[in-house]
Amino acid sequence: MIRIAKRTDYAELVSLFIEENIHNHKIAPDRVAQTSDVLSLKELDEILSDPSSYLGVCEYEGKVVGLVLGTFHLKRPNRWNPGRNFAYLEELIVTESMRGKSIAFGLVSAFKVWAKAQGASCIDLNVWHSNEVAIAFYRQVGFTDKQRLMSLPVDG
């Protein structure tokens, strides 16, 4: 069952965010520090009370096994930018033991419904270039490449 997160989901949300933090640290240790300080109750309350934020969870047999976190953005037009309304998918996490059961599909679908209701014309996200499993999933649900973030070390 996919539903909006509640404050009472806090411990399970923290567990999912820690799992994601470990995963991201392994992929990009120069960018992501491993930590257990991933979400405070105050931060959760802010997310839950912000109408431009969406935090959905997948509950299976009474336990939260996945989450999707995203935000809605309105970019006003200017001389060089036509402006746009879009949703940004910040986190999509499914606990490792539940992967391959279409949970991520359901979470993205729920986020897409919310994004459309907000007036978004698209959903954007960033994904680590070496996270081939995630890239394949995002392509499978319809995401396409729009730009590439590149980095150049300046030391050495």
Image (cartoon, rainbow, N blue to C red):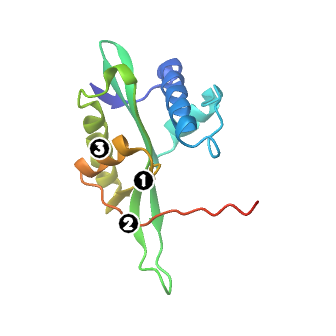
The amino acid pointed to by label 3 is Phe
Mark 3 crowdedness (10 Å alpha carbons): few <14, some 14-19, many ≥20: few
Residue 99 percent across, percent down from the top left: 31, 27
Q: Compare marks 1 and 2 and give the one earlier in the sequence.
A: 1
Query: What's the residue type where badge 1 is placed?
Result: Leu
Kindly report the distance in space between the C-alpha atoms of the residues bearing marks 1 and 2: 10 Å
Question: Which one is earlier in the sequence, the residue at label 2 or at label 3?
Answer: 3
Q: Which residue is mark 3?
A: 137
Percent x, y for residue 107? 31, 37
Comparing labels 1 and 2, the label whose residue is closer to the camera: 2
Q: Quadrant of the N terminus?
A: top left
In which quarter of the view is residue 103 placed? top left
Q: Real-space Cα distance between discs 2 and 3?
A: 16 Å
Q: Which residue is the site of mark 1?
A: 125
Q: What is the total number of numbered labels drawn onto the structure image?
A: 3
Residue at the (43%, 66%) spot, across then down: 147
Instruction: Give the residue pinned by disc 2.
Output: 146
